[in-house]
Image (tube, rainbow, N blue to C red):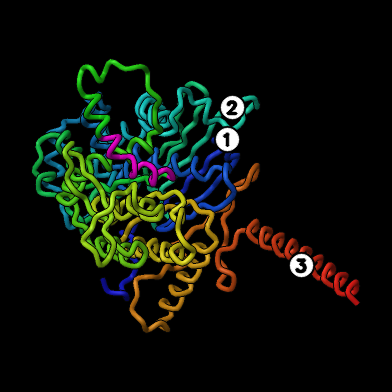
Amino acid sequence: MNGDDKAKTHNTPKVEISVRNFGPIAEADLDLRPLTVFVGPSNTGKTYLSVLIYALHRIFGEFSGFVLSHTLRLLGTGLDYDPPVDKKVLLEQFNKANWDQPFKFSDLPQGVSKRAQTSLNTPYFFGPDLKTELLRCFDLDSLSGLIQSPNNQNDNITIALRVNEADQNLWSLRIGASKSEITLDDGNINENTIIFPADQLPSTSLINSDDTTTLLSEHRRYAEKSYYLPAARSGIIQSHPVIASSLVARSTRTGLETAELSTLSGVVADFIEKLILYEGHTRLRERAKPNDGLNHVAKALEDNVLAGQIIMNPSPTGYPEFVYRPQGTEQDMRMTRSSSMVSELAPLVLFIRGLVRPGDTLIIEEPEAHLHPAAQTQMAATLARLVRAGVRVLVTTHSDFMLQEIGNLMRVGMLKEKDTLKKETNDWLSPEEVGAWHFQNGQPVKEIQFDHTVGIEPEDYEDVVESLYNRWAGLQNRIEELKDESERECE
């Protein structure tokens, strides 16, 4: 990739999310950017909001393509339309559309567009799926587990989602959740929302399709995906061969005769599933979308941080085994014998190389875990390269080293915009591409504004530095006093 290329952000729309009374979060209003960073003490809601965003992706798909997938799903439900809609006529309309012009929501038959608008404000269409997905992702039996203060009078969660492009609202939705049910209101789709851009024709099989089920499956095949790397990924990839073997054993009738088992959260289960079926998933993703330079990102992470390769080998169970091969050797090491840094970064390498594609969303909990400070700064560069490749990235972090390097990469971006940086590099971020959000107990989530002199600096980090300095000064002064007393006694 040319280092002078502009950001490949795929013209992703601006996604605004507002939540109230959700888990540890009393109030949050933020927007997702090419790189979104959640910072703050533990147990303040960073993971809660990250998992929520992942769950919303799984229900609504990539936010930019939601209107198309929503329309196709409606057409496949067999619902009645007012006025009536002939699906064959609609498919002919797709096929005969003037592809020199974008196909907009307003170009749909009135019955379809009306039903699409109405379904965004009725709980029966998205409500059951939303409830199921939230309970699955958070591993809960009841929505009451997500309510911040169950004993307060305000025992409802509110989630507002708004998708904009070029200062124009594309679609929006408000979700309410009580202890037992989901409600939806304020849903709206802008009639000017583009379903098929003029310069992005649907695939041939989609255009020539004769049924909406094929249309929807084709759209989902090529649509952007979301991936979540949980904080427990290091232990999971070390134990994943045992998990795979256990699945084989439990696939027999004898294996099914067991006591009730503990359950996993949806994000952890999805992560394990991607590892166990990694080879099949990578083949599907490669057929749907080319890697488009992301191999270089994975290779740089292996060369600059891991000093070795992450390799997939076949195993007797039929599930893949992942090993680490240090540079300069031909000897492979199992993940259980490798360093914590290797097992921590191996899933990221595998996902970047085999699964993630431009336009996808990648959520990483604490990417700095088990990394030396120098490697943490390299991780910041990896995040910038992902953004340059067109991936939307969200991370939670406690790392001041990584935040400082992200600030440096934003300064590099400022210099590139002014054409004063001559060296070609893909390790840069523009200030507009980065959003850092500070989570604190009992306080609204606030954006940390970037300052080119101090970078991204959470207030509580300054408090910790000041406290450490004051403690050092006090102890050092005491040591000097004792030293002086000892010298006087010796005189």
Disc 3 residue type (three-letter):
Gln
Q: Residue drawn 13% across and 44% down?
A: 206
Secondary structure of the residue carrying tag 1 is: strand
Where residue 158 appears, as percent x and y from the top left, is 52, 35
Which region shows up in magenta? 231-244
Q: Of helix, strand and loop, which mostly describes the magenta segment? A: helix
The quadrant in which residue 236 appears is top left
Most foreground residue, 424 or 91: 424
The quadrant in which residue 264 appears is top left
Q: How crowded is mark 3: few (under 14 residues within 10 Å), some or many (20 or more)?
A: few
User: Is residue 298 shown in magenta?
Assistant: no
Q: Report if residue 13 is visible in the image.
A: no
The quadrant in which residue 33 appears is bottom left
**Which badge, 2 or 3, comes first in the chain's sequence?**
2
Task: Determine whether label 2 and label 1 are within 8 Å by CB.
Answer: yes
Disc 1 residue type (three-letter):
Asn
Circle 2 residue? 155
User: Is residue 242 shown in magenta?
Assistant: yes
Q: In this view, does 487 lie above or below 170?
A: below
Q: How far apart are marks 2 and 1 (CA)?
A: 8 Å
Circle 3 residue? 476
Circle 1 residue? 21
**Which badge, 3 or 1, comes first in the chain's sequence?**
1
Q: How crowded is mark 2: few (under 14 residues within 10 Å), some or many (20 or more)?
A: some
Q: How far apart are marks 2 and 3 (CA)?
A: 51 Å
Secondary structure of the residue carrying tag 2 is: loop
**Which badge, 2 or 1, comes first in the chain's sequence?**
1
